[in-house]
């Protein structure tokens, strides 16, 4: 059964979508105000803390928009914010990984140069 | 029979678990205050200002050794939010294991904006060099 909320393919007897956690039912409306929509607030806070990037702030703003828009009935806007929040969490996370990788390479190069006495 | 997608998802889950365990082990044995194996905060490196996460590494080291007060001194917001973030993480794991989701707490527009504004205020406040805001700096 394909989840009507996030598109994740689940087993036919699944009660809950393993992709986004929404309850699965064959006759579910494709978009409703009561449907669970992740706001990605927790991961946005985590990437802001760990990656220390202003990029995490973008994820935070999008995450904050989700619930209000959902309550206001702007389902499409709420979903757009949810998707943007998820995207920016990954961008901030990726930027952190890239920075970390460069740092480790730099340290290794300095250590090798130091041990050969060229530094 | 599990599909290839399920296998990849399971592999990713194990990978995430392994990364968290490794990070915790490194943080336990190597104090970020005394070692330079940890990368510096990129925001601090480029701007000279503290970010909301600055001090988290040292605070986690202190927490893993049971020193809650030192952790609170280094990054109070991170330490206070840790139980809530842990709850969010456990809830997410419950959902992906197809069990029932944990009760959702702090839902609604107000709480989302409260958290986001709090992080931004904290970000600015810990860079202001006036007592009592100085206690927020790592």
Image (cartoon, coloured by chain):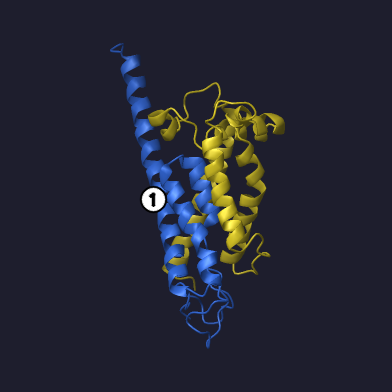
What residue sits right under mark 1 in the picture?
A91
Q: Quadrant of residue A34?
A: bottom right
Residue B53 visible to the viewer = no
Mark 1 element type = helix
Q: Quadrant of the C terminus of chain A?
A: top left
Q: Is residue B39 above or below residue B110?
A: above
- Seen in the image, is B131 located left or right of residue A7? right
Q: Is residue B5 above or below residue B50?
A: below
Query: How far from the left and from the top, in percent, is residue B128?
Result: 54, 30
The residue sitting at the bottom extreme is A27
- The residue sitting at 53% across, 88% down in the picture is A27
- The residue sitting at 40% across, 30% down in the picture is B47
Total numbered labels placed on residues in the image: 1
Q: Quadrant of residue B44?
A: top left
Query: How far from the left and from the top, in percent, is residue B121?
Result: 55, 42
Nearest the eye: A41 or B134: B134
Residue B130 visible to the viewer = yes
Q: Quadrant of residue A79?
A: bottom left
In the rendered structure, the residue with mark 1 lies on which chain? A
The residue sitting at the front extreme is B130
Q: Which chain is yellow?
A: B
Q: Residues within 10 Å of mark 1 (few under 14, many from 20)?
A: some
The residue sitting at the left extreme is A118
Q: Is residue A97 above or below residue A59?
A: above
For chain A, what colour was chosen?
Answer: blue
- Seen in the image, is A76 located left or right of residue A110? right
Query: How far from the left and from the top, in percent, is residue B37?
Result: 47, 27
Query: How far from the left and from the top, in percent, is residue A33?
Result: 54, 77
- The residue sitting at 46% across, 72% down in the picture is A6
């Amino acid at each position: 059964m394909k989840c009507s909320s996030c598109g994740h393919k689940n087993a036919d007897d699944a009660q809950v979508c393993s992709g986004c956690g929404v309850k699965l039912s064959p006759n579910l409306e494709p978009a409703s105000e009561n449907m669970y929509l992740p706001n990605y607030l927790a991961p946005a806070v985590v990437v802001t803390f760990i990656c220390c990037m202003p990029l995490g702030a973008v994820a935070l703003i999008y995450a904050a928009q989700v619930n209000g828009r959902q309550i206001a009935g702007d389902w499409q806007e709420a979903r757009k914010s949810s998707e943007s929040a998820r995207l920016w969490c990954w961008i901030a996370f990726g930027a952190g990984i890239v920075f970390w990788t460069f740092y480790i390479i730099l340290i290794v190069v300095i250590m090798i140069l130091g041990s050969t006495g060229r530094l | 029979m599990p599909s290839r997608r399920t296998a990849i998802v399971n592999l990713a889950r194990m990978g995430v678990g392994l990364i968290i365990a490794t990070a915790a082990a490194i943080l336990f044995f190597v104090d970020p205050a005394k070692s330079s194996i940890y990368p510096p905060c990129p925001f601090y490196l480029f701007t000279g200002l503290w970010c909301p996460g600055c001090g988290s590494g040292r605070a986690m080291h202190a927490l893993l050794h049971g020193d809650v007060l030192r952790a609170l001194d280094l990054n109070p917001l991170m330490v206070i939010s840790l139980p809530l973030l842990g709850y969010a993480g456990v809830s997410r794991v419950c959902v992906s294991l197809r069990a029932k989701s944990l009760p959702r707490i702090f839902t609604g527009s107000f709480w989302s904006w409260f958290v986001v504004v709090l992080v931004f205020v904290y970000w600015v406040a810990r860079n202001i060099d006036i007592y009592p805001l100085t206690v927020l700096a790592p």
